Image (cartoon, rainbow, N blue to C red):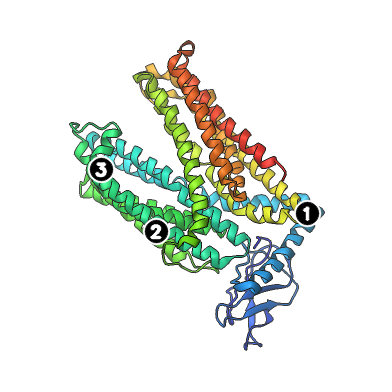
């Protein structure tokens, strides 16, 4: 349901704090019962609404047309064909209200829609930063309290867990895409089953990755550049094996966060990330500073923080009329079809994208120690900034499925879709320009913040402009690709990303075989900007294409 309707507490009977007004309703044998509306701040029109009563298993009908403040959304428990029909009726009434508002007062509609996007995307900003935040906290605490060797042991581990984060992120995208589409169509029971299947997949993948990291710790660290003869190698292996224990909780947390986002709830995932960070900081202070456990203490603190966050998400998942808590289970062959249809192309898309990054980075690394150090100094900042556009992609995946479904009904409904898309892209341009300023101004005017070595400063300054362009285009690509995910254009996205990978490989081969006038590192960064330009153009043209 939409934000401009009130939240209805559909239980038999219920009293909501802050409101004493009661409206008559019919519900099975409770013909004299009441439904109480929750109070908020601004008036809007509410018409006939229906919902499944979770207490007496009957249907609730509110017959009063009232002026009432809006809350976040209507949470109605609907079951069966009748439930879907009633939800479609409420959704149609809501769509008419939005159409009336945008035709009568477009400025007011845009103000409400921008507020709705900001209310969702703001808290969601913490989610893509969760794992990098854990690694940053560990690095800061170990660096200050445990010494240089313990800090060095975190270097290869950061590479490994960042890659794991990139790989398992497709679970969250698949869960958000599938559940968002099912909830937009009113299929709550199917969405609940999809959540159960996603949790089952996440636990299996988490356990498999945990076992792999436990058994192949030495090999993985070696692949990441850590020599077995290094003084910090044993500490690095210990950190890797301890932190691998939390991977099932981490993968489950990704699915639970996406399930809440699909129900347009972004505050609870953000709070879970903040609680995990607080637990991690407290654990680091105890285990590293007081008990002197070094990198191993940091790993234990991270494991405990992620377990607490996953447990919190399980607790808040069924609250406020959302889907009930689900037991993890694997789907049968029939139920596997929607996940296979999503996970296959999403895996190709994510792997192709990560390979593009890998080819770009390996080309810069092969240029020599000075170029590699300068590249890595700027890349760390840029990669963190690139995560900050992801909430706009998530907002598009959550808010647009109903817009796409309604757009099939006629030209008037398509206006709502166009306006919401324009607002998402406009927000990405503004946000991207802000992030681009950070990505460009710091390397251009403060290279000493990246490295005290003056030899690197000219190279760091030289990539400031392409870093800015890449940051802007990266942010703009987020809502565009999020809209295609909301449409279900997964095979198209996978195919185009594979084609872009071929282009990037060809371009990096040209850089490796030619000096480009001594501007090889700058050329790599311009290719990074071109990578995102290709994504924006190709995906944007597909989004604009009319059926």
Towards the viewer: 501 or 261: 501
**Mark nearer the viewer, 2 or 1:** 1
Q: Is residue 249 left or right of residue 381?
A: left
Judged from the image, the secondary structure of the residue bearing numbered disc 2 is helix
Q: Position of residue 495 (x, y in %)?
A: 55, 38
- In this figure, which residue is indicated by the disc labeled 3? 216
Kindly indicate the quadrant of the structure image that contains residue 401. bottom right
Residue 436: percent from the left, percent from the top? 55, 32
Do we see residue 471 in this rendering?
yes
From mark 3 to mark 1, how far is it between C-alphas? 57 Å
Decide if residue 444 is in sight here.
Answer: no
Q: Residue at x 64, y 83 (%)?
A: 27
Tell me where residue 369 appears, x and y as whole percent: 34, 20
Residue 310, disc: 2
Identified at 55% across, 69% down, the residue is: 321
Check disc 1 and report the residue beneath it.
410
Q: Residue at x 65, y 78 (%)?
A: 60
Front label number (2 vs 3): 3
Relative height, residue 365 to residue 182 (above, below): above
Few, some or many C-alpha atoms within 10 Å of disc 3 (few <14, some 14-19, many ≥20)?
some
């Amino acid at each position: 349901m939409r934000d401009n309707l009130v939240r209805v507490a559909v239980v038999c009977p219920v009293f909501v704090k802050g409101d004493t007004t009661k409206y008559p309703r019919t519900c099975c044998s409770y013909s004299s019962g009441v439904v109480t509306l929750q109070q908020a701040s601004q008036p809007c029109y509410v018409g006939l609404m229906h919902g499944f009563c979770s207490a007496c298993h009957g249907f609730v009908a509110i017959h009063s047309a009232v002026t009432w403040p809006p809350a976040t959304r209507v949470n109605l428990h609907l079951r069966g064909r009748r439930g879907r029909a009633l939800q479609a009726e409420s959704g149609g009434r809501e769509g008419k209200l939005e159409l009336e508002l945008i035709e009568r007062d477009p400025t007011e509609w845009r103000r409400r829609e921008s507020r709705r996007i900001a209310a969702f995307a703001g808290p969601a900003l913490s989610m893509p930063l969760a794992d990098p935040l854990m690694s940053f906290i560990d690095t800061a605490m170990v660096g200050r309290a445990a010494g240089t060797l313990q800090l060095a042991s975190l270097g290869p581990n950061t590479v490994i867990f960042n890659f794991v984060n990139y790989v398992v992120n497709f679970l969250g995208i698949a869960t958000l895409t599938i559940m968002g589409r099912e909830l937009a169509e009113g299929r709550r029971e199917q969405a609940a089953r999809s959540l159960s299947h996603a949790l089952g997949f996440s636990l299996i993948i988490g356990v498999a990755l945990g076992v792999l990291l436990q058994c192949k710790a030495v090999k993985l660290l070696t692949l990441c550049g850590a020599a077995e003869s290094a003084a910090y190698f044993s500490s690095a292996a210990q950190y890797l094996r301890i932190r691998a224990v939390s991977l099932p909780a981490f993968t489950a947390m990704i699915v639970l966060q996406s399930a809440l986002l699909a129900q347009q709830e972004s505050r609870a995932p953000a709070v879970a990330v903040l609680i995990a960070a607080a637990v991690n900081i407290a654990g680091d202070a105890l285990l590293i500073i007081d008990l002197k456990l070094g990198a191993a203490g940091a790993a234990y603190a991270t494991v405990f923080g992620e377990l607490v966050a996953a447990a919190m998400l399980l607790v808040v998942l069924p609250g406020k009329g959302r889907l009930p808590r689900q037991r993890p289970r694997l789907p049968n062959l029939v139920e596997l079809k929607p996940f296979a249809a999503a996970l296959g192309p999403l895996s190709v898309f994510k792997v192709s994208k990560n390979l593009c990054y890998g080819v770009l980075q390996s080309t810069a690394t092969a240029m020599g120690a000075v170029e590699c150090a300068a590249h890595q100094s700027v890349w760390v900042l840029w990669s963190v900034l690139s995560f900050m556009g992801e909430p706009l992609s998530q907002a598009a995946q959550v808010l647009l499925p109903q817009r796409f479904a309604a757009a099939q009904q006629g030209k008037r409904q398509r206006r709502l879709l166009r306006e919401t898309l324009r607002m998402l892209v406009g927000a990405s341009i503004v946000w991207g320009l802000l992030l681009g300023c950070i990505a460009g101004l710091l390397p251009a005017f403060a290279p000493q913040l990246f490295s005290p070595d003056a030899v690197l400063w000219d190279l760091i300054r030289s990539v400031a402009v392409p870093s800015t362009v890449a940051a802007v285009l990266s942010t703009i690509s987020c809502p565009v690709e999020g809209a295609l995910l909301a449409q279900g254009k997964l095979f198209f996205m996978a195919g185009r990303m594979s084609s872009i990978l071929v282009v990037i490989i060809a371009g990096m081969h040209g850089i490796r075989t030619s000096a480009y006038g001594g501007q090889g590192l700058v050329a790599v960064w311009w290719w990074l900007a071109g990578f995102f330009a290709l994504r924006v153009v190709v995906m944007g043209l597909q989004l604009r294409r009319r059926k």
